[in-house]
């Protein structure tokens, strides 16, 4: 069922050399347990991204549907970008981030949960389409584990940046910046901060390895950022923070060095931590949602 291999050789996922399925360390690159305890064939079935894209798309879709069902009467239908939009209390209960949840309510974990939530049908469709384009590309360049780490870092830094923007813009002389970028998010959701993190990683890859990859990623980032500046309701601070977070994380995840086994472990920890953040949000916010109905 799980296709566990107990004999023979496998390809080391880090350096591509043949190793024994039971070897404790790759003789070429030193990666521990390169045969993944015999489950390497199973992991390869999930593709280059180790199944992260279908998992994320499925979770985002389920959470979007649940956030609608949780407060049916609060569903908003007005306008293209607000069509089938969950209510504010519902999104807050599931883990929306922003100035109010993070700084006023002390729900510090919501920068992890907010990236899995979406504020409308067009919103989730747009983000999941580009997730399917960018995540496999970054997994190819950095490895699946490092891609998950970069994705999560972009989300965390992006939403913290959005949450703090309201305070930053109170500094005298920064009103023009607020007029250009927007005022930050009192409440904010969406995978776009993490997607900008992936773009930041590709731009860094372009500076270190392939300028063609970097130019294409920078073109996408510039287009989406300008689009956000001219459209209302877009969290430009989360986009900017996500890009910076992904770029800095990719510097730590040096693309000139192969992915290590512990990178995949930490990538899975990021996914588990995100699920835990959603559960924590529901535990602490469900009664508030029920009280508004």
Image (cartoon, grey):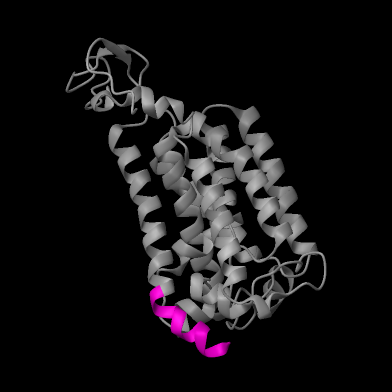
Residue at 46% of width from left, 79% of height from top? 286
- Direction from residue 191 to residue 232 in the image, left or right: right
Q: Quadrant of residue 283?
A: bottom left
Query: How far across and how far down the image is residue 21, in percent?
Result: 24, 17
Magenta stretch: includes residue 112: no
- Direction from residue 154 to residue 180 in the image, left or right: right
Tell me which secondary structure the magenta stretch mostly adopts: helix
Is 48 or 45 nearer to us in this picture?
45
Q: Which residues are magenta?
A: 283-293
Residue 100 against residue 237 in the figure, above or below: below
Residue 98 against residue 262 in the figure, above or below: below
Residue at 33% of width from left, 12% of height from top? 17
Query: How far across and how far down the image is residue 79, in percent?
Result: 82, 70
Task: Judge whether residue 113 can be spotted in this image.
Answer: yes
Which residue, as the protein is rendered here, is positioned at the far front? Answer: 1
Residue at 33% of width from left, 28% of height from top? 2
Magenta stretch: includes residue 284: yes
Task: Judge whether residue 258 can be spotted in this image.
Answer: no
Is 195 or 279 nearer to us in this picture?
279
Residue at 67% of width from left, 80% of height from top? 73
- Direction from residue 269 to residue 149 in the image, left or right: right
User: In what quadrant of the picture does the C terminus appear?
Assistant: bottom right
Residue 77 against residue 9 in the figure, above or below: below
User: In what quadrant of the picture does the N terminus appear?
Assistant: top left
């Amino acid at each position: 069922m799980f296709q566990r291999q107990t004999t023979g050789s496998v390809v080391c996922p880090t350096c591509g050399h043949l190793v024994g399925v039971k070897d404790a360390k790759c003789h070429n690159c030193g990666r521990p347990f390169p045969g993944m305890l015999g489950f390497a064939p199973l992991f390869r079935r999930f593709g280059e991204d180790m199944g992260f894209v279908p998992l994320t798309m499925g979770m985002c879709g389920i959470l979007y549907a649940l956030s609608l069902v949780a407060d049916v009467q609060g569903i908003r239908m007005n306008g293209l970008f607000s069509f089938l939009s969950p209510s504010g209390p519902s999104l807050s209960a599931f883990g929306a981030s922003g100035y109010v949840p993070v700084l006023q309510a002390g729900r510090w974990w919501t920068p992890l949960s907010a990236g899995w939530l979406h504020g409308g049908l067009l919103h989730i469709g747009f983000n999941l389409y580009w997730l399917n384009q960018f995540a496999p590309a970054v997994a190819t360049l950095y490895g699946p584990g490092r891609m998950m780490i970069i994705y999560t870092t972009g989300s965390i830094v992006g939403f913290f940046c959005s949450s703090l923007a309201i305070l930053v813009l109170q500094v005298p002389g920064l009103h023009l910046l607020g007029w250009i970028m927007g005022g930050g998010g009192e409440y904010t959701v969406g995978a776009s901060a993490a997607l900008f993190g992936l773009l930041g990683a590709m731009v860094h890859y372009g500076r270190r390895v392939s300028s063609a990859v970097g130019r294409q990623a920078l073109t996408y980032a510039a287009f989406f950022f300008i689009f956000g500046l001219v459209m209302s309701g877009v969290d430009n601070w989360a986009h900017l923070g996500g890009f910076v977070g992904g770029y800095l994380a990719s510097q730590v995840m040096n693309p000139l060095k192969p992915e290590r086994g512990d990178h995949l472990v930490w990538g899975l920890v990021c996914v588990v931590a995100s699920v835990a953040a959603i559960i924590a949000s529901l535990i602490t916010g469900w009664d508030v949602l029920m009280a508004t109905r």
